[in-house]
Image (cartoon, grey):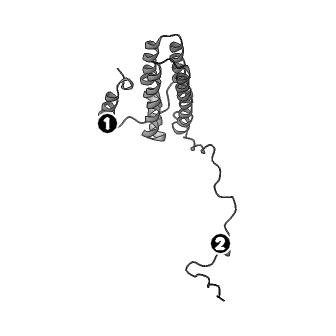
Amino acid sequence: MSPLGNPVLAVLCLLACAEPPPPVTAPDAHSWNDEAELVVRGLDEVQSLWEAGQRPAAKTLADRVYTERFEPRMERALREIEGPQAAAQVEYTFGQLVLVLDGKDRARVEERVDTLALRMRSIAEAADRAFPPPGQAAAPPAPPKDVRPVVPDVPPAWEATEPVGELPAPPPEG
């Protein structure tokens, strides 16, 4: 049984990992995008099994996609790039997927699968920059998307300000 099915096992697994993991490296036989697509194809198959009414098989496959596809490479890369909280969010979403596979709400299943698919592709994009194949230099981090400047692009007028420590004289009363 994987940690997704039992929260107590998940906590015990986290506590048992006292030894640091090996360094993250690019996949040997394919790219990070290919690695993400393996997870996405597995998630698509989970959804197909669920739609066919094979709920136990869908849950088993979701668990295997997590433990055999996401966890070995993608999760380690995500932890290295964005930290443990980001990895915990993806783990939580996988857990939510397993839970909604018991129900009959197609929209909830599709939402979890779509969320995970988008996340896998974004992890692959970041991992491709951070952990290139051997012999290639790592690319600089991509600039954040949807960032707008807060301050207008106008140089400060330092000369127009008064010296620090001297306050202007108060206006005369009267």
Is the residue 154 above or below the residue 41 in the image? below
Question: Residue pushed farthest right?
Answer: 154
- Left or right? Give the position of 94 relative to 7: right
Type of amino acid under label 2: Trp
Query: Who's the residue at 44% across and 24% down the image?
Result: 66
Is the residue 164 above or below the residue 55 in the image? below
Is the residue 2 above or below the residue 49 in the image? below
Residue indicated by mark 1 = 19
Between the residue at mark 2 and the residue at mark 1, the CA separation in whole angstroms equals: 54 Å
Report if residue 30 is visible in the image. no
Choose between 97 and 126: the one closer to the eye.
97
**Could you tell which of marks 2 and 1 lies nearer the N-terminus?**
1
Percent x, y of residue 157: 68, 70
Instruction: Using the image, tell me which numbered label, if any, was put on residue 131.
Output: none
Q: How many marks?
A: 2
Res 151 → quadrant:
bottom right
Type of amino acid under label 1: Glu
Percent x, y of residue 150: 63, 55
Q: Secondary structure at mark 2?
A: helix
Give the foreground label among 2 and 1. 2
Residue indicated by mark 2 = 158
Choose between 93 and 163: the one closer to the eye.
93
Where's the C terminus, which quadrant? bottom right
Query: Who's the residue at 52% across and 28% down the image?
Result: 116
Percent x, y of residue 19: 31, 36
Q: Are marks 2 and 1 in contact (CB under 8 Å)?
A: no
Query: Who's the residue at 53% across and 34% down the image?
Result: 123
Choose between 89 and 71: the one closer to the eye.
89
Q: Secondary structure at mark 1?
A: loop
Where's the N terminus, which quadrant? top left
Report if residue 107 is visible in the image. yes
Choose between 59 and 156: the one closer to the eye.
59
